[in-house]
Image: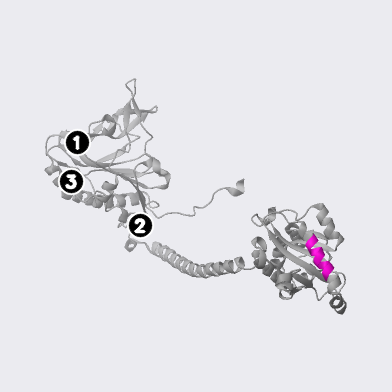
Amino acid sequence: MAEYLPSNVLNDRDRPRVLLVATPAAEESTFAWLSARCGTYRRVNALLEVDPSEWDVLVTDQAYTTIRTTDWGLDASLWDRVPDHLFIFRTFRPGNGQAGSRFFEFNIEDGMADSSRALRRVDSVPGHQLRRIQALPEAIQDLVKSTLVPSAEARLRQFGIQVDGEQLAPAVLNFRPFLAGPGDIYLAGSYERPGGAAVWLLPDDAKSLENWFDIALVEWHLKDRRRFPSVQTWQSNPDWDTRKERLAREQLEKLDAEQAEALSRYEAQRSVAATALEAEHAIASSGPKHLLNGQDDELQDAARIALEQLGFKVEDMDLVWDPRERREDFRIRDTDAPGWVAIADVTGVSKGAPGSKLATILGYIMKYLVADKREREREREREPSMWVIVNQLFHRDPLTRGDLYRADDIQTLVTHNGIALDTSALYVLSQSIEPGSTRASECRAWLRSARGQITVADAYTWMGSHP
């Protein structure tokens, strides 16, 4: 089974891959700006609808983790925590007070939630005094002044984040508040996750949430350039490259350009080849492949053409006989064997080959021997061979159709120098052998000397022994 192990991803999607867990209404209002900032984007109602390992960012206005109280008064996880590799951008509003939804994150010891060490959401805090947080990046400070402060000033009461317990690790690492409010709450903030990702928490009444998301992307790019490859920062600006970085970047850009040109050339050539293949499909379906699934005149025409491709001279007797008194379909001759002739009839049936067809062809042979005696003597033709060209069980795979006749019918064919030729075998031979080649001559000699039946398996066996 080792040879069947999965390898490279065939449908790799652009990054960052951003998953929005929110209602359709929230998507159209609060997060209308989001899809334009994503390499790959999708909105779902719940994480259960996707495989989180395929995504980079979770954006949501809902709880991404919660706790509940057991019958013994202990806190336990209601569902698994969001996978640690996901970066999270969470907006929040005053809630309904249910304990489980009050938490942004909590610590877990021995498999149990420890709500005494958690980031908690608090509501209805009186006051409007706001305090600046030192050492924040300038871009965050600017957004705090322009978006968070006006929103807090407009509220009747404050809501935000409260830190419970001095030790939040390992679930919460390096908690960083953006703005402090009354009652020891923080109006927004971020923290790092154990898997190396990060979480940003913003109140939903903050203006310009898209600008907050853009700054988050910049920080996340510096943490994980694979998941956030196209975010531009001064640190990644090529204007500040070293000489060797410039040379390496130029080589990379050259390779990318060559790949794009090669891909464009490939797509054009593939389009031409695909069009040609479709055209050949149409030709094959209306011609040679009637040997595999055809009946009546279509099958007869396909058989005649295939025999002629192998080098036989095929006389279409339907053009000779009175339509009211038809006999055999073909008289087949071979310039390599003067005097040899086969009386042949072509039939296509959805069931097994009919044994009555043998008696019918024997009747044609008797008429040939008696009524066409002078022609036979003039052409110096010996007693004719008897060929039944059969497309049986044509709804099945040709490789599963099996023998054409029972043993007693095959003996009848042997007795009268005859063969039952499976049209699938004729198809394989005519499509595999170059017309006019030595191999074609050898194939005709084999068919002339054969007795009994020739199935598609016999055709493959013969070709294997006559490369």
Q: Is the magenta stretch mostly helix, strand or loop?
A: helix
Q: Name the residue under label 2.
A: 230
Q: Mark 3 points at which residue?
A: 148
Q: Give the range drawn in magenta.
A: 359-367
Give the residue at the far front of this rendering: 324
Q: Name the residue under label 1.
A: 185
Secondary structure found at label 1? loop
**With respect to residue 313, does 52 lie above or below?**
above
Q: Quadrant of residue 279?
A: bottom right
Q: Which amino acid does label 3 sit on?
A: Leu
Q: Left or right: 179 with respect to 238?
A: left
Q: Where is residue 92 in the image (x, y as percent from the top left)?
A: 24, 41
Residue sitting at 29 percent across and 52 percent down? Answer: 34
Q: Left or right: 181 with respect to 302?
A: left
Give the residue at the far top of this rendering: 72
Q: Where is residue 166 in the image (x, y as percent from the top left)?
A: 27, 31
Q: In which quarter of the image is residue 437?
A: bottom right
- For the N terminus, the image quarter is top right
Q: What residue type is labelled 2?
A: Ser
User: Considering only order in the chain, which callout, 2 or 3, is on the residue closer to the N terminus?
Assistant: 3
Task: Please tell me which residue lies in front, 133 or 40.
Answer: 40
